[in-house]
Image: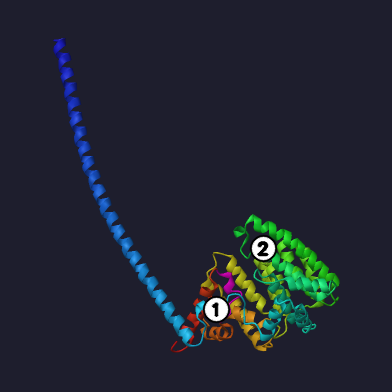
């Protein structure tokens, strides 16, 4: 009897085991079928996604083609109205060289430094114009394709000539900055920094030599030191002392103010707030036609360029920026057309007016500057010609009937 009970239990257990096996097999088959269904559905969804991606890519390509076509149409219309084609824009200077300046540069290139010296001396104590002439000669000597032998010959022939000394000082400054490059610190190599620090120290010594030789009323050797203070990281106190040396001699030298504004920008040694405060104070102190209203425009542009979260479409339409633009327009109307700052303020106004949808006024500025775009704001872009023609051609298309 016990044997039969045990046998029955074993048979029952075996039956349950077999039944469980059949159950598990059936479950596995159901799971396999369900998995196959899911895979089929996933394959279908992937196919639909691929089709959607292909359609999206085609749509994007068509949109891009339409945009390029529209851009080409606008560009052709602008060129038909006398504007310069994109590929012919000169991105190396803000405006054309005068015949006189071109002849002077040609002369010094052949070694005739006396012509360069006379050219600067002819500016007298018009410090704004004199600085432009110093910069033109110094930058020409520092250009990588240039010839600086004439400058060394000038210095050797007249070792105590203050004009030669200040040209040499700015030449040394520009050489240092050329070695560093114009990109932000994170895009500058350690070797570039090493060369820069060595050369900027040499430039500092050169500016101090120029300051020792200069007429006590001459601010230019101190203006030459401004870029050194920015690069070497002068403290606010030290830069303030340098600024006092400049303003004691020429309180309203426009390009000294624009240099100082760079120092006070957040990307260098200050902040957005300090830069704008300095710019507003300079503009308030300027008389009509002195173009000090350029400084707030630069301050607003520098902040917009520095911050990634600014919405450009609304930034330039804020009431305070529109007011600054209007003040600059009036200042320009009051200025001597030969003021060296006219071309710089026109470039900025064209940009601001474009973003404010004041297209007719923007076109007026574009007509004056067209052909030369080696200036802020265009040069802050990796492709300055594209930035310029985008704004110019849009404004022309909106503002000029039949364009």
Per the image, label 1 sits on a secondary structure element best described as loop
Instruction: Judge whether 207 appears above or below 33 on screen.
Output: below
Q: Is residue 359 visible?
A: yes
Q: Is residue 281 visible?
A: no
Instruction: Judge whether 175 appears above or below 363 on screen.
Output: above
Residue with the mark numbered 2: 179
- Crowd band around label 2 with a 10 angstrom C-alpha radius: few (<14), some (14–19), many (20+): some
The first of marks 2 and 1 along the sequence is 1
Q: Quadrant of residue 326?
A: bottom right
Percent position of residue 93, x then y:
62, 77
Residue with the mark numbered 1: 89
Per the image, label 2 sits on a secondary structure element best described as helix
| Left or right, residue 114 beside residue 344 | right
The quarter in which the N terminus is drawn is top left
Q: Which residues fall within the magenta stretch? A: 371-381
Q: Quadrant of residue 157?
A: bottom right
Alpha carbon separation for disc pair 2 and 1: 26 Å
Percent position of residue 167, x then y:
76, 73
Percent position of residue 403, x then y:
45, 87
Nearer to the camera, 308 or 321: 308
- Crowd band around label 1 with a 10 angstrom C-alpha radius: few (<14), some (14–19), many (20+): some
Instruction: Judge whether 16 appears above or below 286 on screen.
Output: above
């Amino acid at each position: 009897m016990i044997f039969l009970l045990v046998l029955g239990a074993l048979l029952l257990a075996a039956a349950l085991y077999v039944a469980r096996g059949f159950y598990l097999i059936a479950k596995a088959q159901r799971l396999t079928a369900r998995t196959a269904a899911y895979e089929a559905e996933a394959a279908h969804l992937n196919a639909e996604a691929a089709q959607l991606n292909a359609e999206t890519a085609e749509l994007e390509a068509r949109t891009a083609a339409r945009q390029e076509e529209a851009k080409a149409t606008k560009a052709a219309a602008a060129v038909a109205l006398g504007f310069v084609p994109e590929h012919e824009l000169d991105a190396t200077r803000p405006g054309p060289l005068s015949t006189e300046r071109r002849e002077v540069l040609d002369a010094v290139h052949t070694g005739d430094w006396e012509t360069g010296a006379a050219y600067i001396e002819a500016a007298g104590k018009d410090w704004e114009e004199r600085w432009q002439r110093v910069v033109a000669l110094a930058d020409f000597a520092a250009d990588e394709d240039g010839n600086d032998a004439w400058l060394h010959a000038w210095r050797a022939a007249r070792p105590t000539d203050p004009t030669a000394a200040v040209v040499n000082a700015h030449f040394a400054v520009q050489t240092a900055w050329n070695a560093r490059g114009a990109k932000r610190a994170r895009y500058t190599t350690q070797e570039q920094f090493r060369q820069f620090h060595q050369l900027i120290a040499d430039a500092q010594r050169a500016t101090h030599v120029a300051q020792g030789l200069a007429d006590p009323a001459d601010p230019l050797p101190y203006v030459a030191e401004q870029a050194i203070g920015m690069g070497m990281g002068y403290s606010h106190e030290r830069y303030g002392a340098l600024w006092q040396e400049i303003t004691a001699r020429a309180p309203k030298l426009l390009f000294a103010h624009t240099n100082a504004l760079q120092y006070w920008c957040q990307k260098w040694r200050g902040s957005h707030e300090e830069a704008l405060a300095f710019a507003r104070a300079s503009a308030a102190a300027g008389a009509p036609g002195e173009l000090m209203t350029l400084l707030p425009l630069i301050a607003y542009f520098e902040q917009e360029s520095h911050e990634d979260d600014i919405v450009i479409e609304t930034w330039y339409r804020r009431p305070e920026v529109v007011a600054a633009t209007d003040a600059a327009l009036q200042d320009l109307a009051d200025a001597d057309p030969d003021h060296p700052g006219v071309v710089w303020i026109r470039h900025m106004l064209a940009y601001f007016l474009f973003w404010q949808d004041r297209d007719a006024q923007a076109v007026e500025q574009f007509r004056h500057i067209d052909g030369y775009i080696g200036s802020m704001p265009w040069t802050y872009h990796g492709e300055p010609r594209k930035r310029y023609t985008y704004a110019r051609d849009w404004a022309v298309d909106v503002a000029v009937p039949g364009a």
